[in-house]
Image (cartoon, rainbow, N blue to C red):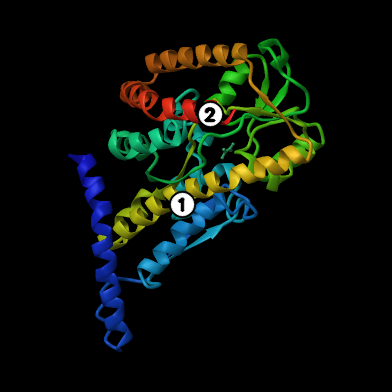
Amino acid sequence: MKRRAFVTRSAVSAATVSALAACAETAGTGTDASSLPRVNWRMATSWPPSLDTIYGGAQTVCRRVNEMTNGRFTITPYAASELVPALQVMDAVEGGTVECGHTASYYYIGKNPTLGFATTMPFGLTAQQQNSWLYHGGGLEAMQKVYSDFNIINFPAGNTGTQMGGWFKRQVNSVADLNGMQLRVPGLGGTIMAEMGANVQVLPGSEVYLALERGAIDAAEWVGPYDDLKLGLHRAAQYYYYPGWWEPGATLDVLVNRRMWERLPEEYQQVFVAATVEANMTMLAQYDALNGEALQELIEGGTILSSFSEEIMRRGEEIALEIYEQTSQRNASFNEVYENWRAFREVVQGWHHLNKFSFAQYSRNQSS
Ligand code: PYR
């Protein structure tokens, strides 16, 4: 039922927008027929504004809310560290320092590992499958339940698609090669890398290049060719690994302080949800359109592409499954979400293996 309620809310948003536009038109004639209040919010983000893809997700939400309410509800996005440090956006929203934020939920798995599901899980769902789980598989309700413990309501508002595995200063062929390496890998991917012997840290996007270039870390993963090129990561390391098996379809979330959310008129809530859905789709389209060309530019500039070895990927998957089982035993919310997510994954992957991946396999064979 709830799932339907979400979809219905999104679907009726167009009607709401028309109603708001009608109010605005009347207001334009000099009669302020709109009883809707003026609301001004701030949105903290975890991103440098130079990344028009990921920071663009925050901008899309803010711009569309403004446009759809004819300027009555404005949200101003702020770059990482302008209001709060990049990796403390959730804390700021929870505490009400800001009304909302645009960030990656897996930066906060220290608070509850279940939050990782909102972004992506190692060996988990592609972007298409993740959206399917969130919007039609009970995923969004499940994650909103987890976030309610933090006085927050969350909405997907961007997806990077399957990421790259990152930039390494030296080649890694075996699990043993990862031992002692200093890596920048966020989320449960970092936990897995640590199990394989690496020293893992999570740095905000704006700090990754300097840390890699100066040798404070030996390898770093950010998103993919377009962003990585902009950050200059190819100038700090030569070996570019794929696939990003710990981030097969990373969602970025807008987090909203629950008290602030409840104070919004329902019309603004619906506009807000519609804007996040638009940002979710737009960011993925942007990444898919931009990454291919950026990859060519990287290769022409001397980047060496390498796939992770079967040994590293198999061991990574084994550790991921162990973590999922063990965390399920001690964390009730993780167990609840994992059970739902695992069942969904089995069905959606079966379907995609039959149609989508067999088509991809055929296309790949034809072009090679
Ligand atoms: C990262 O922090 O690595 C993201 O993919 C956003």
Q: Residue at x 66, y 27 (%)?
A: 241
Foreground pick, 180 / 274 = 274
Q: Amino acid at mark 1?
A: Thr
Counting from the top left corner in percent of width and height, residue 120 is at: 47, 32
Q: Residue furthest bottom?
A: 30
Task: Report whether residue 267 is seen.
Answer: yes
Kindly give the residue lying farthest to the front in the view shown.
366
- Looking at the rendered image, the quarter that the C terminus falls into is top right
Q: Point out residue 103 in the picture as x, y percentages from the top left corner.
A: 51, 45
User: Which residue is label 1 attached to?
Assistant: 282
Which residue occupies 23% across, 40% down? 3
Q: Is residue 144 above or below residue 355?
A: below
Q: Residue furthest left?
A: 1
Above or below, comparing residue 66 to residue 119 in the picture: below
Tag 1, which secondary structure? Answer: helix
The residue that appears at 38% across and 14% down in the rendered structure is 329
In this rendering, would 239 be left or right of 189?
right
Q: Is residue 43 left or right of residue 165?
A: left
Element under disc 2: helix
